[in-house]
Image: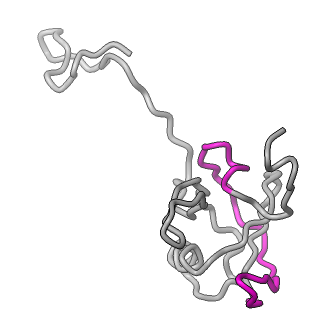
Amino acid sequence: MKMRELFPSKYLRSADLDGETRIVVVDHVEYDDLTNNGRTEKKAVLHFQGSGTKPFVCNKTNSLVMVELSGSDDADDWAGTRIALSPTMVPFKGKPTQSIRVGYAPKEDKMIFTGKSKVKTKNGDRHPLDDNIDI
């Protein structure tokens, strides 16, 4: 049994993303008093529109990114902001720790194409920038 099943959390954790970036839209922000190292602090908790994604506790680093992405330093204005939640490793107390970073999410999902180029030169050859690697 996975640890996240043995010790479930009401908040989103890095392991919940299963190594994948998730695109979400903020529905609303609530504020919870959370205890960390014996200190209680008020934190912004992001809730997401109909995505089935657990609420996400936003630390200072992610809050600063939210300010940039939303255009407002008032967390109450963050509703409607489309963001990417990406699992990553960050240093914490001198050792690598799983974390989630908030980032920019394109307005539309873009498909990534790999393989041979379909672009041809005027004489019918493949484009000279095509590396000719079959995937």
Residue at the far front: name it: 94
**Residue 105 or 107: which is nearer the viewer?**
105
Residue at image coords 60%, 61%: 99
Q: Find out whether residue 35 is within the magenta segment.
A: yes
**Residue 2 or 33: which is nearer the viewer?**
2
* Residue 73, placed above or below residue 45: below
The percent position of residue 14, horizontal first and vertical second, equals: 66, 55
* Residue 10, placed above or below residue 76: above
**Residue 11 or 55: which is nearer the viewer?**
11
The percent position of residue 45, horizontal first and vertical second, equals: 76, 75
Main SS of residues in magenta: strand
Which range is magenta?
A: 14-42
Residue at image coords 69%, 61%: 25
Tell me the quarter of the picture where residue 116 sits.
top left
Q: Is residue 123 left or right of residue 110?
A: left
**How many numbered marks does the figure carry?**
0
* Residue 85, placed above or below residue 112: below
The percent position of residue 3, horizontal first and vertical second, equals: 79, 48
Tell me the quarter of the picture where residue 55 sits.
bottom right
**Residue 35 or 106: which is nearer the viewer?**
35
Q: Find out whether residue 82 is within the magenta segment.
A: no
* Residue 37, placed above or below residue 19: below
Residue at image coords 79%, 60%: 49
Q: Is residue 63 left or right of residue 126?
A: right
Quarter of the image that includes the N terminus? top right
Tell me the quarter of the picture where residue 88 sits.
bottom right
